[in-house]
Image (spheres, helix red, strand yellow):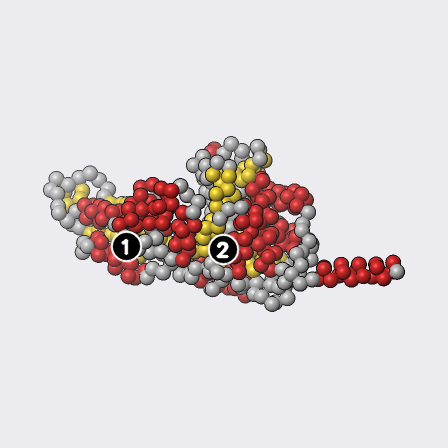
Amino acid sequence: MWQRVAALISLVMLISAVGYGQAPAQPDWTSVDEELMRHFQALLRMDTSDPPGKERPAAEYLKQVLDNEGIAAQLFALEPDRPNVVARLKGNGRKRPLLIIGHTDVVNVDPAKWKFPPFSATRDGGYVYSRGTVDDKDNLATILMVMLQLKRLNVPLDRDVIFLSEAGEEGSTRIGIQYMVEQHYPEIDAEYCLAEGGGVTRVAGRVKYAGIATLEKIPYAIELTAKGVAGHGSVPLRSNAVVHLSTAVGKIGAWKPDIRLNETTGTYFRRLATISSPAEAERYRNVLVPNSKAQADADEYFLDNEPAHASMLRTSVSPNILGGGYRVNVIPSEARATLDVRMLPDEDPAKFLEMVKRVINDPTIDVRFGARDTRPKQPEARLDSEAFKTIEANVTKHYNAPTLPTMLTGATDMAYLRAKGMQCFGVGPALDVEDGPKGFGAHSDQERLLESELSRFMKFHWDVVVDLARTR
Ligand SMILES: [Zn+2]
């Protein structure tokens, strides 16, 4: 009798262990938190400032940790000091892979500005202080732990999960994502990717929403060169290049390129309206009404008060460099300006350049594209995809807040992958909106992350990966 009961029990256990859609065992979160912090601090303590980068120690550390766990990791380097790391957990191939990304390099620091040394990973008052805490060693340590836990818990997978740590994200993508996409794409080819670029916004300590990056603008540079006749400063000339150039820059500064919304920005403003004050909500709804006075008024308000929102509405142009003349009594024959252009992903660059020429309307000014580390054209990551829905469900579960798809005004490595047809979503831990202005944000004088939010991000990320990849 007992034998039969025992056999029945083990049969039931076997069925539930391999059962259809069975949730995998959960990690022991207390020990995961400790280990996550250990890897996070180890990575933060490596000075990977870019330039020069020197990401090799961080890459070797990651490889070692993965290899020790039985997850074979490979280094791919265009320059010996700056390797990328790839590791793969095999699934049954029923679905196409999921790629999870973090970058090892960080932006430079001015050590004099730091209360704690910038590569100390000091824990103080619930925060970790270091360059890289929110860009991007938070993602890096988290995806490392996701890989380790998937392997340790032996989670059966419907798709491969691929780990990628990149070098050179901060300004030398040719050795990082560009190199991987152009020369080793089969190693990282996937249906979906999760990378930096999103994050959860807290206001007064409470979560307000999660911004999930689904699209980004494309950076270009436009060079203006005014040519005139050189002469003696005592005899002003109407052809003065400085005058022509500054008039042109003034016209560009006053110009408001057409407003154009896409699925991401439309959904963003619609959802933002649902969690805003009545006055704000009205503007976020008005901006969705094409060619209306209400839209124009909202745009004016954004230009004055919410410039990031104004930029999300259009291809933006910011004159950022100006040069001309060398002494007070000489009329220079040439003056130059450089415009920072952030194009909507569907903008036609050649047509846009023609528009800029028409706005300037001055034959003495040469208008052309300048050299720039740009990005390829890319489609939006789909909001009706399994990945976005999974992310959204887990934002609700872990943060109890709405998910806002966002179009980044800046550029990330996701553009290269989206251009290959991969659907990429930018994610990140929760940050206090007040922390940026205090000088603790990404690329700021100092950088810090709440330990509790790193821990929450880990659980969120784990659930997203498991929900997308485990065997159903
Ligand atoms: Zn970054």
Q: Which mark is residue 84?
A: none
Above or below, comparing residue 297 to residue 415 in the picture: above
What residue is at 56 percent from the left and 65 percent from the top?
A: 96
Residue under label 1, please give it.
291
Residue under label 2, please give it.
425
What residue is at 69 percent from the left and 62 percent from the top?
A: 19
Locate residue 318, reporting x and y percent. 31, 48
Give whichever of 229, 362 is nearer the camera: 362
Q: Where on the picture, by quarter, is residue 101?
A: bottom right
Could you tell me which quadrant the C terminus lies in?
Answer: bottom right
Above or below, comparing residue 114 to residue 471 in the picture: above
Locate residue 288, reporting x and y percent. 34, 53
Instruction: Give the CA separation, mark 2 to mark 1.
Output: 31 Å
Locate residue 400, reporting x and y percent. 53, 46
Secondary structure beneath label 1: loop
Residue farthest toward the right in the current orientation of the protein: 1
The amino acid type, in three-letter code, at marker 1 is Asn
Q: Nearer the viewer, mark 2 or mark 1?
A: 1
Residue farthest toward the left in the current orientation of the protein: 235
Locate residue 71, reporting x and y percent. 66, 57
Could you tell me which quadrant the N terminus lies in?
Answer: bottom right
122 relative position to 363: left or right: right
Can the viewer see residue 276 in this picture?
yes
50 relative position to 340: left or right: right
Secondary structure beneath label 2: strand
20 relative position to 51: left or right: right
Give whichever of 13, 158 is nearer the camera: 13
The amino acid type, in three-letter code, at marker 2 is Phe
Q: Residues within 10 Å of mark 1 (few under 14, many from 20)?
A: few
Between discs 2 and 1, the one toward the N terminus = 1
